[in-house]
Amino acid sequence: MVSKKSGAGVAAALGAAMLLGAGAGTAHAAPAEGGASLAKTDVAQALGGTTAGLGYGIAPVKDLRLDPWANSSADVLNNGATVQPDNSGLAPVSTGTLTGPLSAGGGPRDLPVVGQLLGALPG
């Protein structure tokens, strides 16, 4: 039986075999005298570049507007509930502490606990 493979598939398989074969052959070869060798990696510079790149990726997430209806009449987070404890001298507890920054159009950076944690990340 004759196999009917396309020329592109055979070429791709041949190219992959050549790349894998060339990579395997040079991975174990020692550099010749006077030949090229790899430079040592500067760890501080690599971490600095990673941190800067991570900052550019995380900064938009920190400022992402979580409440799409903020500052509108349809904002459901604009409503709040307050619980007044019995006459024991405790202050009232309200949901406005958590929902207030969101209903004002804020993002994760503006939330009480999450904002402090996100402050530790670059960006």
Image (cartoon, rainbow, N blue to C red):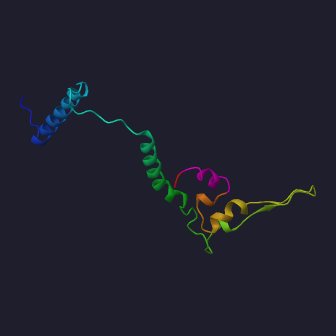
Vertical order, 25 against 121 (above or below) = above
Q: Residue at x 67, y 53 (%)?
A: 113
- Quadrant assignment for the N terminus: top left
Quick check: 122 left or right of 18? right
Q: What is the x, y in percent for residue 52?
A: 46, 52
Tell me which segment is drawn in magenta: 112-121
Residue at the extreme bottom of the image, as rendered: 73
Residue farthest along the right direction in this orientation: 87
Magenta stretch containing residue 57, yes or no?
no
Front position in the image: 21 or 120: 120
* Left or right of 55, for residue 105: right
Which residue is most to the front?
A: 34
At 72% from the left and 61% from the top, the residue drawn is 97
Q: Is residue 42 left or right of residue 31?
A: right
Residue 24 locus on image (x, y percent): 23, 27
Q: Which image quarter: residue 109?
A: bottom right
109 relative to 38 in the view: left or right? right
User: What residue is drawn where x is 73% and y is 65%?
Assistant: 80
Residue 4 horizontal/vertical position (percent): 9, 36
- Camera-nearest residue between 49 and 87: 49
Q: Residue at x 11, y 37 (%)?
A: 5
Query: Viewer-proximal residue, 104 or 39?
Result: 39
Q: Quadrant of residue 11?
A: top left
Q: Position of residue 71 (x, y in %)?
A: 61, 73
